[in-house]
Each structure stands twice: as structure tokens, then as C-alpha cells.
Amino acid sequence: MIRRVVWTPIVLAGALAAGGCDEKLKSVAGPTPNLEPTFASIQREIFESTDSAGRTACTQCHTSTGRNPSGGLNLNHDVAYDQIVNVPVRGKPGAIRVIPGDPDNSYLVQKLEGSSAIVGRRMPSNGPPYLTDGQILILRRWIAIGAPRN
Amino acid sequence: MRFTKRGSIALSLVFGLCLPSALLAQEAGGDDVAALKLAEPDFTLVGLPTSLRVPTFRGSFRVTHRFRRPLNDGDFGDLAADLFGIDSGAQIGLEFRFGIVPNGQVGIHRVSNRTIEFFGQYSLWRQGGAMPVDVSALATIEGTNNFKDSYSPALGAIVSRTVNDVVALYVEPIWVNNTNALPKQLVDHNDTFIVGVGARVRVRPTVYLVGEYAPRASGDHPGVSHIAFAIEKRAGGHMFQLNFSDGFGTTLAEIARGGPQGHDWFMGFNITRKFF
């Protein structure tokens, strides 16, 4: 009897602890429920796609397909990573588009958040809608963990 | 949920403590659980639990109040004008615990931010003879939004020692999962391991001074570590406590998350009523 009394709460507590209590990424990702902090996901869900909130895909302007990419930034699938990570900003000397490990000083984040430090307009230029706080949080996380080519 | 290495170690420690005790745990036996323990008169220090047992099929009720106005906000005149924070809103908790088996208790603690915590505690070893300390196992789970969102389980141990009828000392290693409100993909740590330490000193026949500190040994550690001190008065089955803390957490996950950055201090009180 005593053993059962002791074991029951312990097993119950273990089951509760192992039961999966974490928040779901979907709850943060908002209008892009499949968005994850990986480059492939950001490319697919943010750069190349509109979302259910009506935000415009970045590649509508930042593409070399049939036009000169806006701001000299080409986010087409095969070149996007090399266009942003550790690449200087054309219109703002000293600024870097994505600084691995440093989302606060990455110009891409500043442009998407509409920071006072940016030159020109907040992106997307036809916004609102802009990226949601959750979408930017996921983008920030990808940069914070080193902006890997994953 | 992915078990971290740290989480697994914490679980192993708790289970390691519990397994042999399954064989050693005794029924209440000769000692009178309902009798007043002068050095350990209450079930909590300020926010951290104590080793005090609830007699089987008896209960205890507690009200917690943490006024949200920082005591260090403005000058003394501002503070006095707000009656030291009493005029401001408060985070209020209601708690009931019940002895379900000898040495075992369960309870529920609901906070006015709509967090509900369920907890269970089992006394494994009693201080006395060759045993220098009390050891209890503790398991809790809390959920926000009336236990519908964001669940945070915790496992831990309460190690205490009373000295005569004057002092009670506590060390409480506790692992709390899901302390970060964000998904694990977006954070470096999603659990917190705290090592709570605390003491209660009986300075007058019915007056106590209480202090507790819950530094985060590892894991997520936003803000500042929970620290609190209090003065309290025992009156029959009641304990009236006036406390000061650097946050207003009263559940284990809230305590693990610590207080807000900036070293604010808040006033509050606890009232406990034993029904035995």
C-alpha cells in the first residue's frame, strides 16, 4: 500500500513532466504557420510567399527575374543567402544586411521592423501589412543562432 | 517536449531520492502530525514550500497578496500617498492543500493572473535519530489561462533542518520545465533549475522572521532571481505574514522566472489558516 502511494505521485509527476508542455511554434508564426527559424523556411515562407494576412512576397521586387532587383538585393532562391549574410548594404555605408549572431544590428531586421536607423521605407514597401512580431521573432532567432545556411 | 540533459539529470536526482524512500517511508506512527511545530509553523516560507506535513484528511487554506506598485518607485511622499502600494492593484492567490495519505499532501493554488498550480508533496525522511534532516519530494504543474495554456511542471526536493524550536533551515533544489513563454525553437533554454534556500527564525514566542532566495543555477533566467523576506505572527491556527520581495511570483514557475529587471521591491502578505 505504502509503495503504491509513493509511486503513484512520482510516476504521475514524471508523466506530467514528460508530457510535452512547450508552446507551439505555430502560435508565434501567425499567418505563416509553417515558418521555422531556418533559412530554407524563411526563404520559402517570407521571401517568396505572400501570407494569409496579405503581406507581399519580398521577391515581388527583390528579384532579377524580368527586372533589376530593388535596392540591389536579389532574394531569388539560389542567390538569396549569399545576398544577405555578411553583405554590406548598398544605400547605407557600414550597415550589413545580416550579421550572424547579431539580429539587433542586422539591417534586414531593422528594415522589416521599421527602425529609425533605416534609409528609405520600412519593408515591405507597400505595407501594411508588415511582418508580424512573431514572424520577426523567428527571423531574429535564425540570425541569433548564427544565420546558418540550413 | 525534448528532454534536455539538464532536465534528465534533475529528474534522475529526484527519482534517485524517491526510490529508496519507497522502502523507508514510514506511516506517521508515533509523531503527532497535527501538533504545532514551533520552528516550522507554516507550509511555506514566503513563496517556497516547507517540509510541514498536513494530517491525513485535514486541510489548510492560504491567501497570498502581492501589491504591484514597486516600493522604490518615486520618493517617500509618493509611496506614502499610495499607502505603500496598498492603493495599487495586487496579484492575489488562493490556495488549499489537503492531506491525502500519511506524509502526503496535494493542493491547488490559483493566482489572479489566471494561473492554476496543482501540487503534491510527500515526506520521505523525517529529521530525528540518525537522520539530520527532513527530506520531501515535490511535484507541481501549473498552467496559465485557467490551466488551458502554457503548462510548466516542476520536480524537486525540500531538505530542511530545524534547530530546537527556534530555527528552520531549507535547501530546495527544484527543476521547472517550460519557464520560457516562447517555443523551444526560439529560446536557448526552456527550463530552469533553482536552488532555493531559506530560513525561518522564531524571534518571539509567536513572531518569526523569514527569508528566502531562489537563485537560478542553470537554464532560463530572465529578470532577477527571486528573493523575499518577511515578518509574521502566529495566532492560533492562523499565520499572518507581511512580506517584501523583488517579484510577485507565488507559483514555482513564477518564482523560477524571477522578478522584473531593475531590482524593484514589492510589498505583500500571506495569510494561512490551518483546519486542524
Image (cartoon, coloured by chain):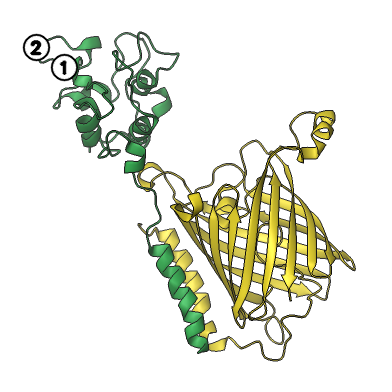
Say what secondary structure mark 1 lies in.
loop
| Location of residue A98 in the rendering, given as x and y in whole percent from the top left corner | 32, 25
The answer to whether the residues at label 2 and label 1 have Cβ atoms under 8 Å apart is yes
Q: Badge 2 local density, few (<14 within 10 Å), some, or many (20+)?
A: few
Residue B147 located left or right of residue B261 = left
Above or below residue B55? Residue B261 is above
Choose between A15 and B271: the one closer to the eye.
B271
- Say which mark, if any, is on residue B270: none
Choose between A23 and A54: the one closer to the eye.
A54
User: The residue marked by circle 2 belongs to what chain?
Assistant: A
Residue B13 located left or right of residue B234 = left
Residue B144 visible in the current orientation: no
| Location of residue B232 in the rendering, given as x and y in whole percent from the top left corner | 82, 59
Residue where numbered disc 1 is placed:
A63
Residue in view at x 43 percent, y 63 percent: A17
Above or below residue B40? Residue B117 is above
Residue where numbered disc 2 is placed:
A66
